[in-house]
Image: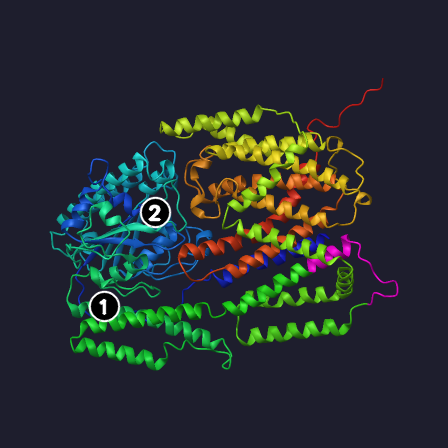
Amino acid sequence: MLLFFIVGLLVHFVFFASIFDIYFTSPLVHGMAPQFTPLPPPARRLVLIVADGLRADALYELDEKGNSRAPFIRNVIMHEGSWGISHTRVPTESRPGHVALIAGFYEDVSAVVKGWKENPVEFDSVINESKYTWGWGSPDIMTMFAKGATGNHVFTYSYDADDEDFGAQDVTKLDTWVFDNIKEFLRAARNNQSLFSKLNDEKIVLFLHLLGIDTNGHAHRSTSREYKDNIKLVDEGIKELVSLIKEFYGNDEKTVFLFTSDHGMTDWGSHGAGHPSETFTPFIAWGAGIKYPQKVPAQKFDDGLLKEWKLEYWKRQDINQADIAPLMASLIGVPFPLNSVGILPVEYLNNTDVFKAESMYTNAKQILEQFKVKMTQKKEVTLPFLFTPFKLLSDSKQLDVLRKAKSYIKQGKYEKAVFLCKELIDLSLKGLSYYHTYDRFFLGINVLLGFVGWASYASVLIIKSHASLPRGVSKEVKKPSHLLLCSFVAIGILMAFFLLIQACPWTYYVYCLLPVPIWCAVLREYHVIQDLVTSLWTFPPRRFVGYLLACILGIEVLVLSFFYRYMLTAGLVVFAGWPFTTHLWTRAKMLSTVLSMWAVYSTHNSLLKKQGLPLINQMVSWIILAASFVVPLLSPRSLLERLFSILVSSMSAYLLLSRGYEALFPLVLSCLMFVWIHMEQETLQQSGVFCKQKVTSMHFSSSADITQFRQLCLDDIRRAFFLVFFFVTAFFGTGNIASINSFDLASVYCFLTVFSPFMMAALMLWKIFIPFVLVMCAFEAVQLTTQLSSKSLFLMVLVISDIMALHFFFLVKDYGSWLDIGTSISHYVIVMCMTIVLVFLNGLAQLLTTRKLRLCGQPKSHLI
């Protein structure tokens, strides 16, 4: 059985990893030729200012007194430049946001989990294409664009990573550091002839990354006074910086300024998902090559924001975040980033019509080059009779559109040329998506076969090992025919040869060959299947249909609970009636719990006073967290005492990671678990199974007595379903934590306040695991009280979760809004993680319930 669990873990890991090959693959291709506009650009230099974590409404709206909290930026909107909303994509995180801004493409989601400091994939960017770039800001962002840049032309300056402290007294210092350093840089350049000469060259980029707003948003929330005051500070800093740069260059009017953000922020101080507060970011451009403000009587937007911001008469021009990269490239005359999928927003350009048309033509050729390379790569690794080209953009149509567009430009029909180029870009992007997802159906079918095969094999194993099926006496169990094994070996060889011819990645071999041994193992147990069919024929039809409908309904309720939380409420209402049939009283111990409450209260007050995280609080928090793993192992192994010890220890750690009413969740969940344990034993007694002991007298044992185990009955399916139901309840019990933006960084402030993404993520993951551990420990107790093998119940749980995962595999979307796409994928990932984590939690629960530590050696015995 140990081998089965190891194999099962590997199989589910493969199913989990498949989602990254199917939906999260990198969109990058290489081998394109650089494309740039063959006309002199309007600007010699670009100043890009990115206010990390700034949501659009926080900048554009007026305060309570009717004044702008960013008066300089508002003056630019009304008198100097163009403005709008930059729409970001999920995940709304710093790394993918900056990649979209500066490189012009939307990085695959998996890049987020690969770290912020290194590039998971190499990509071209405006910074790489510039003559020289100087950047100031966060070390995470600066190193991202400095690494991999060709030549010695990118120079970055950053503060220490420890300065990114959410509990610091004043985090606006992160922004003042940037402004002070660039001012000192410009002053020093006047006395450094080499540096002065470089700064006066063309194709120059000055990049400012301002992290203070994002840090204040995480620490105090985006509706706080600190967040809004930081916007005022940034506005004043930009005003002074613009004046200094104009003076430095002698007001030559060859500088273009862009001010935007990588992502927004929710009201509760987080980001990562697709809420408008996260995806709506400001975009303001002014200076060389940018259109002046345009007053209009009416606008096409009906979201009510213009009236709310008192900007209804100043033309708003929204763009996608990736569109900023080609705009920057066009303004300073550098080649468009090779992997950019952004569409040049010509409405922002203040230049000749021929320049706009030529720039759009360059944009179309640059994206078309990616399409051609992608098509060639896919064609080379696909058998000719199996290759299906993208019919909307044939070779002849490509040439025809390019020829017509060039002809329109020569004839002075610039608007027609721009329109034709936009059509070509649209087709090229659709073609890129087509070839990017070319193998999706093929891989999906193979993963489906693997899913169904594994669920079938687990079911067969349950029936074979833990259920008593009637078997005819005259029937002899024959060994599987060698023909069956040879047939599956032949299928595997043919599949491997097929993949080899097409030069598929090694992961394709895993997904395609995995179903072969799984289905071979299923069919080798054909006699079990025959016995099951025979048994079902003898089952009363009404009862069989009733159980079948109950199973289907139960699983559908679990699936629907991911979309509609009230489905969990309906289930909990049913369970709520159980306490009325029994009395369950426990005694509480308060030492560590009271200490946790003090640590949370003290830390909260200290952070409110901006005094940082006290060292004593930090030490106490880490000690309590460490003790929560050890204290249960010191308690007696009697069922109720051990479970109660686990509850108190876990609740102490959970308190330190909580911010409000959610701290009560483990207590409420544990009460429900105690009721479940008690009622399962009573239900078993009513069904006629004799139980020798009461719950209060039972003990956990590290060595199970298999002679006390019984065979499976239909009620055991309900017990397995309850475990899955409680798992889902534990996951969603305090809110929807399926989205990245629902993780509140304030939850870890008792342990650390300096930004450390992986340590913070580890602490928040443990917070998620605590309710799971409580449920799993209760499940161990249910297995003990019902005298049922843990292996059999656990196998049924795996089958139920696999059926749920199969549901979500079919429900994954690659169309619609980015929120819908991200949600559908996250549901599949959550269920697959649950399946894998079950194996880990089963071992952890057994450790917590059955193991006993003795700190002072063996206890002494005294003779009387």
In magenta stretch: residue 296:
no
Residue shown at 52%/50% (left/top)? 562
Across and down, in percent, residue 556 comes to 58, 53
Residue shown at 47%/52% (left/top)? 113
Across and down, in percent, residue 224 comes to 32, 36
Q: Quadrant of residue 320?
A: bottom left
Across and down, in percent, residue 258 comes to 23, 53
Decide which of tag 2 and tag 1 comes sooner along the chain: 2
250 and 208: which is toward the camera: 208
Across and down, in percent, residue 608 comes to 37, 29
Please, what secondary structure does the residue beneath circle 1 have?
helix
Above or below for 556 versus 40:
above
Classify mark 2: residues with Cα within 10 Å, few (<14), some (14-19) or many (20+): many
Amino acid type at mark 2: Ser
Residue farthest toward the front in the current orientation of the protein: 542
Label number found at residue 398: none
705 sits to left or right of 250: right
Residue shown at 52%/73% (left/top)? 503
Residue farthest toward the right in the current orientation of the protein: 474
Q: Quadrant of residue 683?
A: top right
Residue farthest toward the top in the current orientation of the protein: 864
Residue 152 seen anywhere in this rendered image of the structure? no
Q: How is the image coloured?
A: rainbow
Give the magenta-colored segment's residue range: 457-478
Amino acid type at mark 1: Ser
Please, what secondary structure does the residue beneath circle 2 have?
helix
User: What is the quadrant of the C terminus in the image?
Assistant: top right
Label number found at residue 277: 2
Label number found at residue 359: 1
Residue shown at 49%/51% (left/top)? 563
Residue 295 seen anywhere in this rendered image of the structure? yes
In magenta stretch: residue 477:
yes
